[in-house]
Image (cartoon, grey):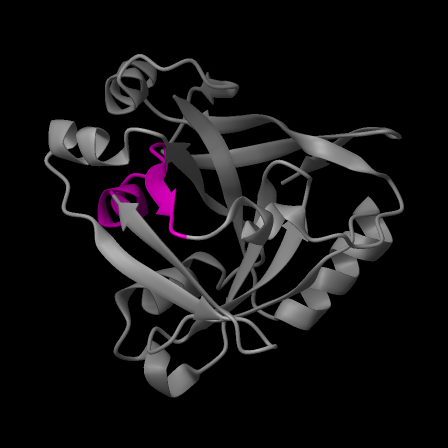
Amino acid sequence: MQRIDHALYGVRDLDEAARRFRDELGLGSYPGGRHAGRGTGNVIVPLGRDYVELLGVVDPVEATQAPTARWLQDLVADGDRPVGWCVSADNFDEVAARLGLTPTDWSRELPDGTVLRWRLAGREVAMENPTLPFFISWEIRDDQHPSRTMVNHRARPSGIAWIEVGGDEAELNHWLGGESLPVRVVDGPPGVRAIGILTDGGEVVIR
């Protein structure tokens, strides 16, 4: 089974983006941490079962040697925007094998020193073609998933309702192996166009 794990929103300044999400969208967040040796860090907007990751460059020196950080800097040069999405797959290794992907190990240290670990597959492909998600397999307890942390939301969210992407629908269906996910495909260049969040105050759309 596959499900949307999180959506990525690229930002130039993590603190400013977190303030904007709180003030304009009513969505609270908490500091995520740094991706060791990769030049990036994040702020998490937890939604109960999934989350939005505000992703920014936090170490310009490390960023010069990190492909993900350089990719992110290029994408947000003209402003903050959705930059990708991630799918959790119960059969992660089978998905990777079917698509000819080599999983990589990732980790992030939380402010309290706890280290979260996970595996990714397809990240490089998704960077080149952001219509497609990359895949994740968490190596943590369920209660450590970033979506589970309680924060103060003005509008209480219940998860990602949909993601809208531009690109080739047939290509996306092949990539997902026929799995049905709440994704809208529209005409236009590859990329995430919008993220719909369901809250008790109505739908919040992130663009």
Q: Nearer the viewer, residue 162 or 20?
A: 162
Classify the position of the C terminus by image quarter. top right
Q: Nearer the viewer, residue 201 or 73?
A: 201
- Residue 119 position within the rendered picture, expressed as x and y whole percent measured from the top left: 30, 51
Is 90 on the left-hand or right-hand side of 20?
Answer: left
Q: In this picture, which residue range is highlighted in magenta?
A: 122-139
In this rendering, is residue 60 above or below 51?
A: below
* Quarter of the figure with residue 203: top right
Is 139 on the left-hand or right-hand side of 56?
Answer: left
Q: Is residue 186 part of the magenta span, yes or no? A: no
* Quarter of the figure with residue 166: top left
Q: Is residue 134 part of the magenta span, yes or no? A: yes
Question: What residue is rendered at 45% in x and 40% in y?
Answer: 85
In this rendering, is residue 57 above or below 59?
A: above
- Residue 59 position within the rendered picture, expressed as x and y whole percent measured from the top left: 44, 82
Number of dots carrying numbers: 0
Question: What residue is rendered at 14% in x and 47% in y?
Answer: 102
Question: What residue is rendered at 20% in x and 48% in y?
Answer: 103
Is 161 on the left-hand or right-hand side of 60?
Answer: right
Q: Residue furthest front?
A: 141
- Residue 10 position within the rendered picture, expressed as x and y whole percent measured from the top left: 52, 56
Classify the position of the N terminus by image quarter. top left
Question: What residue is rendered at 50% in x and 78% in y?
Answer: 58
Q: Nearer the viewer, residue 195 or 103?
A: 103
- Residue 112 position within the rendered picture, expressed as x and y whole percent measured from the top left: 61, 77
Q: Residue furthest bottom?
A: 61
